[in-house]
Image (tube, rainbow, N blue to C red):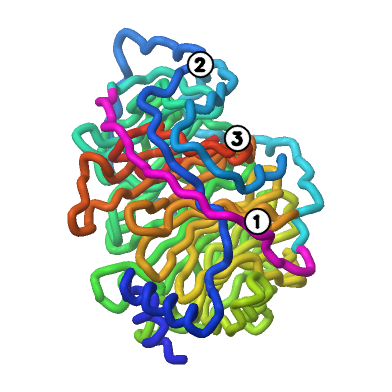
Amino acid sequence: MSLTSITVRRFAGLLLGVVLSAGLVACGADPTPSVVIAATTTVPAPTATLPPAAPPPTAPAGVTEPPTLAPTAAPALAPATQVPDQATATTLPPATIPPTAADTLVPATAAPPPATSAPASDTPAASDTPAPATVTTAPAATPPAPGLTPTAAPVSAGSIVFVQHGATPGLAVIQPDGSGRRLLLPAGDLHTPRWSPNRRHIAYLRGSGTHADLWVVNADGSGARRLTNTPGVGEADERWSPDGTTLAYARSTDSNSDGQLDTQDPSEVWLIDSDGGHPRRLADGRDPAWAPDSKRLAFATNGKPDSAGAYGTGNTIDMINAQGQNRWSPIKIPAIPQDTSLVDPQAQFNAATIFLRYPAWAPSGQSVAFMAEGHSGLIVTASDKGTQPTLRDFQYEGNFAHVFWSPDGTKLLYEAAPPNGYSGVTVLTLADRHRFALGGRPGNSAYTPTWAPDSAHFVWVQPGNNSAVGADPTSNPAGALLVSNLTAGAPATTIQGAEAADPDWR
């Protein structure tokens, strides 16, 4: 099958998805794996049970941009049951941490956190046949978001940082029950905030495309500083090392002058110290991912650009140490399982993988999960040596994006992109192959998920359906921020009604 055909099928939208599904049913096969589609409900006013936040100081600390600087050379998921249409808010009281007096970044000599052991379920299983599941649905609606007030008050453990759009754009934090919403850094054109491992700093991107640069700000919103200044080069996918001393990120240029940065443009993986010092090129590639020991990274190589599709072809998942040494390619496309009947016995076709992306390390450091792109998208795990490649999920004529291990190593959380054009989110429990799905259908989309520290909750964004004909942005606003509880079997709780993006929970 040609790459042109793959591209047409991927982006044909809802009509093509319906036609393809009808054809498969006529042939007596259901190509779509059975999943549990989780319900979503509106909680008019989540009950705040968290300890009250410390009052802001008399004169909130303002944030000014420094001059431009050039850089120097868990428990198992609940069984699938009928979900009620309404549910009370789930209370997730985080422990309060004392404010820190440190307004500077962690020095490079900071000691790494104690090592933790991951359960044996990090190791890929020999087979992956999903358990039967029922499908439940419920309407989703979200209230408008109140305004935010800038503050320099310290944040507490378990806070969610996100990008706030609208009339008061910037970086904001909120507690997982919807209380304590605060604007930390009033500024526009921000993306992908990421907590440092000790929660004292937030890395983020400012600017878009080739104008995107890497910044870091203190957790109270003070001391914003620019780490990179690279005109014509765009930074992306910033990732803290687990010991908090270094940031990895990707750098790309619009080499084909098509006005966008994509996999047709070569990318490089770079490292920079958390205080902005010692920027250095690590390797050619994208999607950097730190191993838990902060000594190794995995990344997707560039492969061969191909104008016939959104992705190139023939790349690998490589690994390298943090000094840029001992690079090797343990995960190659020919080793990826292609038979989708390993997941769904009725879906007997070849996925025709051509590109690999988004590696993610298991907490044990012994396994890696990643996405495989082709005729149909795949979620795959393998050992850190590239052995035992195991097919975990597939999206018929669709795709996947970022994949994340749960902090306890028992589950995978990933973004799904079905051919109908409506994004979704899936949680896969590795031990029993139970799947919990959100979105992926008209009027109900979900994207940019991130785990809670307890591995039993996750936060995600509902992009709304404002582009659809007849959509009502009042009842279905874009950018609602929701928290799902995997153990309660209840609908997701809306904690921010609209205009949120890119959450990170720590």
Q: Inspect this view and state whether residue 73 appears.
A: no
Q: Earlier in the sequence, mark 3 or mark 2?
A: 2
Tell me the distance, in whole angstroms, between the alpha carbons under discs 1 and 2.
34 Å
Pick out the residue farthest to the bottom: 1
Image-based side of 124 in relation to 343, left or right: right
Mark carried by residue 488: 3
Q: Nearer the viewer, residue 144 or 116?
A: 144
Amino acid identity at mark 3: Ala
Q: Inspect this view and state whether residue 375 appears.
A: yes
Viewer-side label of 3, 2: 3
Location of the C terminus (image quadrant): top right
Viewer-side label of 1, 2: 2
Mark carried by residue 49: 2
Mark carried by residue 361: 1
Q: Residues within 10 Å of mark 1 (few under 14, many from 20)?
A: many
The correct choice, above or below, for 304 with respect to 362 in the image is below
